[in-house]
Image (cartoon, rainbow, N blue to C red):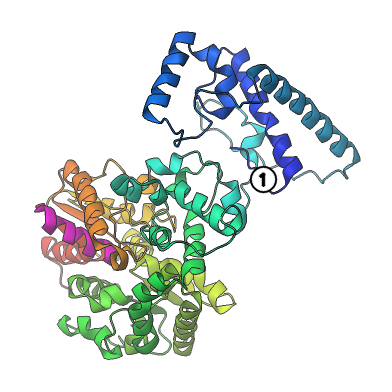
Amino acid sequence: MYRSDETKVIEYVMSLSITKRLNDIGRRHGGHPYGVGLWNTPYLSDIFTREQIAEMRRRKAAQDPRDILNPGKMYRTLPLLPPVVFRVGLSALSLLAALRGRVRQAFARPAPLPTPRPAPRPASGAATPAPALALATQTVPAYTGVANEALICAQCGYCRTVCPVFDVLGWETTAPRGKIAVAKNLHLGNGGGGDVPEELIQRLYQCTLCGSCKEVCPTGIDTRQLWLDLREMAAKSATVSSTFERVSQCVSNECNITCETGDARMLWAQRLDVVPEGLIGQRGAEWLYFPGCVASLFPMTNGIPRAFVQTLARAGLSFTTLGPDECCCGFPLLAAGRVEEARQAAALNVAHARALGVRKIVTSCPSCYHTWKHDYPALVGESLPFELHHSTQLLAELIASEAFPLYHSDGPITYHDPCDLGRTSGIFDAPRSILTHIEGLQFIEMARNREDALCCGGGGNLEMVDSELVAQLGRRKMALVTDTGARTVVSACQQCKRTMTGATRATRTRVRIKDITEVVWDAIQAGEEHYGLTP
């Protein structure tokens, strides 16, 4: 996909000539235009017969007499731009663009040539790969802000095919390209920068921030960051302010999302058979375990930190937690558009971690992990003096070092990729390495996995905005789970566990939901029993 900027009028108009050049290349090789929109209208006679064109126009007029859908773009030419003029005009534009490029190249200072990288040597017997096109080697520019990214969007619609929310609701304003169009018109162009209607603001939050749209965007837009920036712009809206006021007050007053007191953060530890030494606030520990709000404060997910700390203790690691001093990581505030409040939470957590003198931080929550690793440096204004790990990364290392015996005899397991761990943070292999190293465990991949994994519906603060939509997304996820035939679905995210557990109950699906930390701890105990080992 060729990026262009319509605010730079000359460059943008010249870039339109690419359409003609690509069209000519395709036609020389026996192809023809595939669509019937504005740019392909002059070529309709090359695709369809006169009778077919007349029939399409008749149906369009009958079903859309006021020309509301795609006005002026379906099966008709522009009034002052007949096909012949259109083709000649684009040809002339192509010549002008080529001439302009050569003139600029002649007077431009030559750029230094990049240092060539040695080509990877093909494996024995493998065919030498063909050289890639020059355009394919160009790096997609980094995220450049709402204004530029909204202009970059080509409105192609690839994002619609993977958006779980659009799949359920079906309105264009819930699709990624629809939200970008709204952002462009209301903040940058036709809308004049006026107030955003409340209905459209709600659409910004009817999103799990799953990142599927980013994966398929041909122009390389970081849509997840775009949605966060748009939410920050919309955060002062009365509707948004009232929706997230409670969570904001809870984090400000009690440093968590449920308004529990700080002591409640460690209630999960009361059911430990043996409380590891130095579990709370031990100075000089190597590792700081950061459980996060959901694992600490929701009974359904309390088993995650219990399983993880027992595993760390069994491996003989030196670790501790912040205990009642732990604050929300700030992601729910970022997802609500309240960046300054998230900055305060981040500064507090970093200060507490520094005070303990820890060198490494591990969290079992993907959102906490991503926020600490990727957002905290910008929020606190400096690089962090800690190594950041997700629990799956640490567990995979321990298992690879054969730190403990592992055994599983409780039926096949499938794995759900959490959005913030997989697509957002790029961690796909560590969870699978864990599962495939457990003796006796039969691992079955879902039809949609890794970058293509279907969101369970639990992210992006959607539960605070539209709980029914969360339930609908959860039901779709359960359909994929049951198709595997697995008896247990494993994830590596406490919110995914909550959401999918709710979906199993709503659909009466006979599948167990576990976090991968729980699977590992169960496998350690089963392994010790199976091999007759004493802990």
Range of residues picked out in magenta: 492-508
Farthest residue in the front direction?
A: 66
Residue in the image at 86% along x and 43% along y: 110
Identity of the residue drawn at 79% across and 25% down: 95
Can residue 388 be seen from the camera position used here? Answer: no
Regarding mark 1 in the picture, which secondary structure is present there?
loop
Quadrant of the rendered structure where residue 512 is? bottom left
Q: Quadrant of the C terminus?
A: bottom left
Q: Is residue 24 magenta?
A: no
In the foreground, 247 or 171: 171
* Furthest-right residue in this view: 107
Rendering coords of residue 519 (x, y %): 21, 61
Q: Is residue 477 left or right of residue 505?
A: right
The amino acid type found where label 1 is placed reads: Glu
Residue 517 can be seen, yes or no: yes
Quadrant in the rendering for residue 320: bottom left
Using the image, determine if residue 335 lies above or below residue 422: below
Residue 153: image location, x then y, percent: 55, 46
Q: Is residue 286 left or right of residue 304?
A: right
Give the quarter of the figure containing the N terminus.
top right
244 to the left or right of 17: left
On screen, residue 370 above or below 253: above
Point out residue 333 in the picture as x, y percentages from the top left corner: 42, 74
Quick check: is 503 in the magenta stretch? yes
Which sits in the foreground, 60 or 527? 60
- The residue under label 1 is 6
Which residue is nearer to you in this view: 208 or 317? 208
How many dots with numbers? 1
User: Which residue shows up at 45% across the image and 14% down it?
Assistant: 54
**Which x, y percent locates residue 496?**
27, 61
- Overall secondary structure of the magenta stretch? helix
Mark 1, Cα crowd under 10 Å, few <14 / some 14-19 / many 20+, is some
